[in-house]
Image (tube, grey):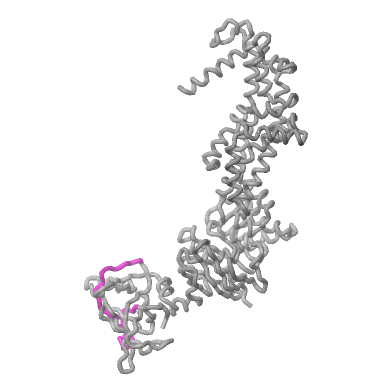
Amino acid sequence: MAALFFCVPIYVILVTSFKSMNEVRLGDIFALPQRWTLASWKYAWFEACSGMRCDGVSGGFFNSLYILLPSLVLSISLSMLTGYAMALWDVKWANGLLFVLFVCAVVPFQIIMYPLIKITGFFGIYGTTFGVAVVHAILALPILTLIFRNFFRSIPGELTAAAMIDSGSFWRIFFEIVLPMSGNILIVVLILQITSVWNDFIVGLTFGGHDAQPMTVILNNLALSDTGENNYSVDMAAALLTAAPPLIIYFVLGKFFVQGITAGALKG
Amino acid sequence: MPAVEFRNITKKYGASTVLEKLNLKIDDGEFLVLLGPSGCGKTTLLNILAGLLEVDDGEIYVGEREVSNLDPKDRGLAMVFQSYALYPTKSVRGNLKFGLSARKLPSDQIKQRIAWAAKLLRIDHLLDRRPSQLSGGQRQRVAIGRCLVKQVDLFLFDEPLSNLDAKLRTEMRIEIKKLHNQLQNTVIYVTHDQVEAMTMATKIAVMNKGIIQQVGTPDEIYDFPENLFVADFVGSPSMNILDCVIDRANDSVSAVDQCDDLVFELNDYKWRQAATNGQKVKVGFRPEHFLQLNGIQPTAKYLRLERRAQFFEKSGRDAIAFLDLPSRTIAARVDPPYADRYRHERVIPVLLPLNKINVFDAESGQRL
């Protein structure tokens, strides 16, 4: 029953997006469209105005993609290697590093926002999708490293001992033994990161400048403009377009996510 | 030149010292078993040899080389673990190949070694399976195969048979022993199971609390234990040990049981140190050394006991009679038919050959 209650707004959004503005103005938000139309969807994707640009949310979609992919690659590769080293190799100051990671994981973004702006400006990546990706990666590193470290700690000690006697090489053991065993945790981390990066607003707003705004920012501009009429159906369609990718990913990979958690993946 | 040598090995964990100045030499071709209860340090010693643990002090030699500072992969040894530790995402062939590719061997040599090891261990039909598709015994053989393909002279086993059921354990024991005879390499084998130790070893090193109690052949350990710990640990059921006092009277030495009424005449005992009158000792004898009264003339070389048996523990092959002494019971092994014969009389006569007795000093526990 509670689930149904939460579905009500989604139902309204869905239904409104398929109506023409004439029907929307009738004000009956729960009514199914008398005439189903995709015009709002087309308009939202191709032509809606965000600030001074009228490209629709499609530009934002590609920006979000260009932000998402590098941030995934950077954050996952770095945190996975660091977690692996901390869990299975004798690292000096491992405990100290662990403590620092814990602290960093709980520090709010707003505290480091301004220094990050200066740093990205210094490196010339402020206002680019790559810059936004880097910031996302930085913010995700502490928690992801902890997740990977905990997962790799659950690998039986005798397995790593056998690998040490066989090969003893940091990279070979990582690629041939540890990585193939990491399927579950990788899916968990991917889903976490994809939803977090795609749905993010503040990092994209702060670091996107004019050219690198992700879909969420475009949506915000579009839906909250003051001038002209509020084309609700277009707003709804744009919102659904923005929310769709993580939802699709979750539907596809979701069962692996649950498997990953119940297999003890998120002990941290 | 010994195959393996430990010199003054010391290992501490925080405040507790697990091993202190431990010295041990193992000859080429030996099958040495490190035997002891849990926590005695035998697995620690094995891991130190393998290079998985660092020592606080001491040196380790494999052959002529000092390996104390070398990585595990450079020490020229191979190891089998209790949980087999097979790589779960690789096939059997992949498991065997991993160590060899890491050593950058040419691929035809790798293929050759894998084929040889697979044939020897009868796992050639399993090469494409994953570990999760194998039975316990098969996994164990793959783990041994992983060592074989390395073609090193030193094999380490860490309680490899503990995870197998009893029948499989017996089979694998024979296989491992046969392999050792075939390859003539040096094996160091850790276990807490004395049956494994006695049946497989050429030499046993009994350990307790980080100290080596005795090193000897299985027969030496069984017949002439050096101290009370070894005497009690090896043998099932355990050796009967009684508190006695030495009585020297007119050139004859005997041990008088303090609490009960037994007298052990020890004139023919092979003393290492002369026992003094009144010295407190412990006298030990094994349940299986008792003889039945089937046509043996009880001479002075035997101690005859006729006691009430409280109850019998029968196991098909043996019947252990628990004989009543005034203050305790002692165990005596007889044949099941013999036990049945005397069951109704409740008093069972048995003979103990006096040359099978062990005498230990009560304070130090050392053999006299």
A89 over B311 or under it: above or below: above
For the point 65% across and 14% down, which residue is it? A234
For the point 74% across and 33% down, which residue is it? A130
The furthest residue to the left: B345
The furthest residue to the right: A124
Q: Position of residue B168 (x, y in %)?
A: 49, 60
Q: Position of residue B276 (x, y in %)?
A: 36, 88
Q: Quadrant of residue B156?
A: bottom right
Q: Position of residue B333 (x, y in %)?
A: 34, 73
Judge by depth and name the residue closer to the eye, A134 or B161: A134
A83 over B258 or under it: above or below: above
**Is B303 a magenta residue?**
yes
Can residue B302 be seen in this snapshot? no
Q: Which residues are magenta?
A: B290-315
Can residue B30 be seen in this snapshot? yes
Q: Quadrant of the C terminus of chain B?
A: bottom left
A169 over A180 or under it: above or below: below
Judge by depth and name the residue closer to the eye, A61 or A130: A130
For the point 60% across and 51% down, which residue is it? A94
Left or right: residue B297 versus residue B60 is: left
B341 over B14 or under it: above or below: below
Left or right: residue B304 versus residue B166 is: left
Q: Quadrant of the N terminus of chain B?
A: bottom right
**Is A247 a magenta residue?**
no
Left or right: residue B330 versus residue A10 is: left
Left or right: residue B343 versus residue A227 is: left
